[in-house]
Image (spheres, rainbow, N blue to C red):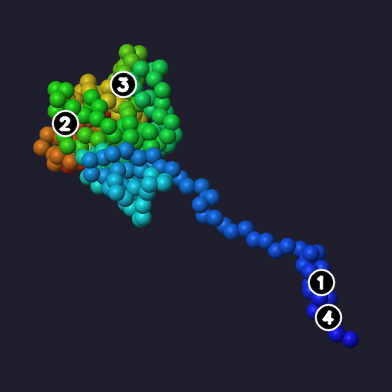
């Protein structure tokens, strides 16, 4: 005996009433977290975001404020990697943001201003945007730049400038002859020429701006660098991108060496 259409319809409604509902959740990409970038605001030609990307203003994403698409990240275009100075503010910030160039633990301990009561930077981006701006060490006679590479991101010298620190340094250098080498000469050669030997464990005392200013003119400023020929002074006839006249201290103490040399620098050597 066949079921009537009404009976069949009632049966289907009964099944649907007690069957478990099927549901799905659409993954809405608009609900995902979007990194909101900080930027160097409005540069004359380009802008740098806090991811280290450089782009023009029209390439900034209106929602994230980050540079759109694949951009140069941690670009050091127009930068002197020896002195860690650049001829562009935006590229200085981008280069500075590279973790391999700026150590976070050191950068976040740098004082924003000279007074001991001043605060420190809260992020690497804040450090880079702050350090890359012009400062008194970038100018001469207060109205002219020392060179076109006046945006510098190096960690400041560890010299405190205090009188007690200066006295302690002099005491620790007792019995040591501080000799200025000739251009391109290593400290081994400098000390040997006067019948002495280079004392490597005294380099850490010479590797400070305060100490170098006592023996060298440093008319081009005092800059952090990386090299086995430091502490040293760049000779006046060196190429412009090497900052002629500048004193250089190495930011990596492990590189301090008696046998290091550079064709465009004169070393400050501890001999005994």
Q: Earlier in the sequence, mark 3 or mark 1?
A: 1
Which quadrant holds residue 230? top left
Name the residue nearer the viewer: 60 or 265: 60
> Residue at 81% across / 76% down in the picture?
6
Residue 129 x/y as whole percent: 33, 35
Helix, strand or loop at mark 3? loop
Helix, strand or loop at mark 2? loop
Residue 271 x/y as whole percent: 26, 28
Q: How many labels does the image show?
A: 4
Which quadrant holds residue 151? top left
Q: Which of marks 1 and 2 is nearer the N terminus?
A: 1
| Separation (CA) of disc 3 from disc 1 | 104 Å
Q: How crowded is mark 3: few (under 14 residues within 10 Å), some or many (20 or more)?
A: some
Helix, strand or loop at mark 4? loop
> Residue at 47% across / 47% down in the picture?
34
Q: Which of marks 1 and 4 is nearer the N terminus?
A: 4
| Separation (CA) of disc 2 from disc 4 | 100 Å
Q: Is residue 89 above or below residue 268?
A: below
**Residue marked by disc 2:** 146
Q: Earlier in the sequence, mark 4 or mark 3?
A: 4
**Residue marked by disc 3:** 173
Q: Is residue 172 above or below residue 55?
A: above
Label annotation for residue 4: 4
Whether residue 76 appears in this view of the structure is: no
Whether residue 4 appears in this view of the structure is: yes
Q: In this view, does 146 lie above or below 75?
A: above
Helix, strand or loop at mark 1? helix
Name the residue nearer the viewer: 71 or 85: 71
**Residue marked by disc 1:** 10
Q: Residues within 10 Å of mark 2 (few under 14, many from 20)?
A: some
Task: Identify the residue at the far left of this view.
Answer: 237
| Residue 35 as seen in the image, left or right of residue 111 | right
């Amino acid at each position: 005996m066949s079921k009537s259409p009404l009976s069949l319809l009632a049966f289907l409604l009964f099944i649907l009433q007690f069957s478990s509902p099927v549901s799905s959740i659409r993954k809405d990409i608009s609900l995902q977290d979007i990194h909101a970038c900080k930027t160097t605001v409005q540069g004359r030609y380009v802008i740098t975001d806090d991811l280290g990307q450089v782009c023009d203003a029209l390439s900034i994403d209106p929602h994230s404020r980050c540079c759109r698409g694949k951009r140069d990240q941690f670009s050091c275009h127009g930068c002197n990697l020896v002195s860690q100075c650049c001829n562009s503010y935006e590229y200085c910030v981008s280069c500075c943001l590279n973790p391999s160039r700026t150590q976070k633990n050191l950068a976040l301990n740098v004082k924003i201003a000279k007074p001991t009561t001043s605060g420190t930077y809260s992020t690497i981006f804040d450090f880079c945007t702050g350090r890359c701006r012009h400062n008194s060490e970038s100018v001469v006679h207060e109205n002219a730049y020392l060179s076109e590479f006046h945006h510098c991101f190096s960690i400041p010298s560890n010299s405190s400038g205090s009188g007690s620190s200066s006295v302690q340094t002099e005491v620790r250098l007792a019995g040591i002859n501080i000799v200025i080498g000739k251009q391109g000469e290593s400290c081994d050669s400098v000390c040997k020429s006067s019948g002495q030997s280079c004392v490597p464990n005294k380099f850490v005392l010479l590797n400070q701006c305060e100490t170098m200013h006592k023996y060298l003119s440093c008319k081009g400023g005092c800059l952090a660098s990386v090299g086995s020929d430091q502490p040293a002074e760049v000779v006046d006839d060196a190429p412009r991108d090497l900052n002629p006249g500048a004193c250089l201290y190495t930011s990596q103490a492990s590189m301090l060496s008696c046998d290091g040399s550079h064709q465009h620098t004169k070393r400050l050597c501890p001999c005994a």
